[in-house]
Structures are given as C-alpha cells and as structure tokens.
Amino acid sequence: MQIKKNEINQRILDVSKRLFINNGYEKTSLRMVADKCFISKSNIYRYFKSKEEIYETLVGPARLSIIDSISRFGSSEYAGNYTEDKIEEISQVLAKVMSEHREGILIMLKSDESKDQIMLTEMMTEFFVETCPVDDREFKVQIVSILVMGLTDILVKYSEESEIRYRLKMLISYHYLGLNGIKERLGL
C-alpha cells in the first residue's frame, strides 16, 4: 500500500516536532527523523530542503505572533503601566498566542542557543530594561532568564488556554509586582 505524499510530509513534521521538543533542535538529526518516520533520510529531501526548513515550517508562525505580541506590549501604553487590567490583557493575549503556537514556541525555547531563543530573550530583555525601575542591567537580564524559564515551564505543563492564562497572569504579576503585589492586587 502506497502512502500519500501529504501523509509523509505531515509525518515528517509531526516526528520532527516531537524530537525538537524532546531533544532540542541541535541534538535532532535528520537520520533520527527518518528512522522514526520509517523512511530513508534521502526521502526527507523530497519534502524539505534541510532540517532548517522543517524548523522554519514548525516555528515561523509562532515567531511572528510572539514578535507582534512583545512589540505591542512594549508600547508606551503598556510600558511601566502594569495595572491589574493591563496584566489581565497581557495574560489573555499571550495565553492565546501560547496555546495556538504552543509546540512552535516550545521548540524555540527548548533549543539551546537557537536564533529564536536568543531573539526572544533579547526582545524581552530590551522591553524589561526599558520598563524596570531597577538600574542594574545584569539583574534585569537574570530576571528575564527566570521569566523565560517560567514561560517554558508553563508550556511544558499546560495546554489549555484558560490554564495557560491563569499561570501567565501569576507569572507576569510576580514579574512586575513581586510577591506583595500578587497578594495585594490579586488577593492570593
């Protein structure tokens, strides 16, 4: 029985997605993908020019949504204005993006030193550097690293948009308001 080409294409993407999330992009080879797909490595090249093209297919839409969201929340309307309603709005928008592009974002965040992980961290750092009242830049970078780890943890553990939104709201509130802010503003 011959398998249709679109089924093989989708199988390559599905297997690559799982391997990229579990092993990271760097530690996943096309040989591994081919073995899990039960096809030859050369057959992958009938569908994709390279491992990078597979990565781009899986991550590209997520990257665009994240860039758009971070740019939106880096505007003067939001910067330094973290009221409860703004935190709710940020959490809601990011939860939607994160649930729609969960696997693509996980690939980005779990790939060691990928261009997308670096881009995401740099965008968040620049955004945070602009809005954080603390003067120590290195401290701000540490805080962003903690935020990125928190985002990764949320995506690993949760897939429902409502749960992601709740966890994001807690993380963002803590990130900007600290523990006292969470207790005061959210009553937790």
Image: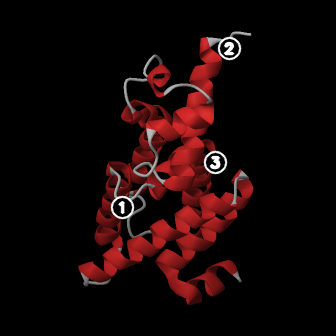
The nearer-to-camera label among 2 and 3 is: 2
Q: Position of residue 110 (x, y in %)?
A: 48, 57
Q: Position of residue 27 (x, y in %)?
A: 43, 52
User: In the visual, does 25 lie left or right of 3?
Assistant: left
User: In the visual, does 160 lie left or right of 110?
Assistant: right
Give the distance between the C-alpha atoms of the residues marked 3 and 1, in whole angstroms: 19 Å
In this figure, which residue is indicated by the disc labeled 1? Answer: 121
Give the distance between the C-alpha atoms of the residues marked 2 and 3, in whole angstroms: 31 Å
Which residue type does callout 2 highlight? Ile
Instruction: Tell me, yes or no, if residue 165 can be seen here.
Output: no
- Give whichever of 152, 13 is nearer the camera: 13
Which residue type does callout 3 highlight? Ser
Instruction: Tell me, yes or no, if residue 175 can be seen here.
Output: yes
User: In the visual, does 12 lie left or right of 29?
Assistant: right
In this figure, which residue is indicated by the disc labeled 2? Answer: 3
Is 22 located above or below residue 8 in the figure? below
Question: Could you tell me which residue is drawn at 38 percent across and 64 percent down?
Answer: 79
Q: Quadrant of the C terminus?
A: bottom right
In this figure, which residue is indicated by the disc labeled 3? Answer: 99
Which residue type does callout 1 highlight? Thr
